Amino acid sequence: MKGLRIAGNSLLYLVIYAAIVMLVNQALYNWISDPGLKDWIGSNSGIVLIVSNIIVLALYLPLLRWQKISLRDLGFSPARGGSMLLSAGTGVWLGLFIASFTRLPWIQAAFPAISDLVAFVAGGSLIIFVLGSLLLGSLLEEWLFRGMLFHTLRQRLSVPLTVLLQAVMFGAVFMNVTIGAFAALGAIIYGAVRAGSRSLWGSLAAHVCSTGTLYIVQQWAGDWQSGTLGSITLISGLGIAAHVLLLLRGSGKRAGKQQVFSDSITS
């Protein structure tokens, strides 16, 4: 019975998110007739994220209150300073990786949909990017996938399976195999940061730093050669792995110390 409730809640969260995004996208692109406004929306597609994310958050807040799920349950608990630095560093490396990897000529030729996704995230005017992708986009994705879904799935599954399943769910939202697989890989990294830092603030810091780094690099990487892009991709990939491993290692040590302390009290 508990498994059915977990599956039902997870599906409910995803349906609300996907339905609102599709509805807002339909409204902004197909229901507006003013030519000037339509052109502006076309050049600032991040407005979809701003409008839909505000609506989704407005629906999630009373839903969580009704389900008696607190912000601490979602992971909004203080993170250690070292964990936050490692989380932010992971985000910087991830932003570098995405920016360089998706600009490789063979990636652009073989998987243009991935490059289009990156252009969407980092596109539009600065204010639209900051409000849409950097702030509201990062907040909602972490709130839903590393917060609500992580908390729900963790009631039944181990941490590795929870990290993997929330990533699969994130990829499924895109309803495209190529884009979904690429997005799921990023969600695995954010999920690992969430698990390693033991705080949603950690994965949120990683997400904001990743998106911000991606935007900055996109402005400067126009004339980078494929050799440079390949080197940055390799180095940033190693940086991601190192930071995540350090986070998970630190989390394991803290868990071990807490267990020893607990055993000493009960003995």
Image (cartoon, rainbow, N blue to C red):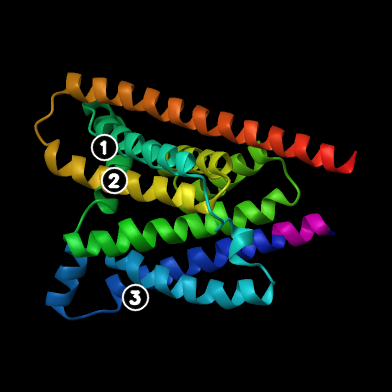
Q: In screen coordinates, is 47 left or right of 75?
A: left
Q: Position of residue 256 (x, y in %)?
A: 71, 32
| Camera-nearest residue between 131 and 227 | 131
Callout 1 crowding tier (Cα within 10 Å): few <14, some 14–19, many ≥20: many
Q: Disc 1 vs disc 2: which is toward the camera?
A: 1
- The answer to which of marks 2 and 3 sits earlier in the sequence is 3
| Camera-nearest residue between 98 and 30 | 98
> Magenta segment, principal secondary structure?
helix
Q: Position of residue 137 (x, y in %)?
A: 38, 59
Q: Amino acid at mark 2?
A: Val
Q: Quadrant of the N terminus?
A: bottom right
- The answer to which of marks 1 and 2 sits earlier in the sequence is 1
Q: Quadrant of residue 62?
A: bottom right
Pointer 1 residue? 99
Please say whether residue 111 is one of the residues in the magenta stretch.
Answer: no
Q: Disc 2 vs disc 3: which is toward the camera?
A: 2
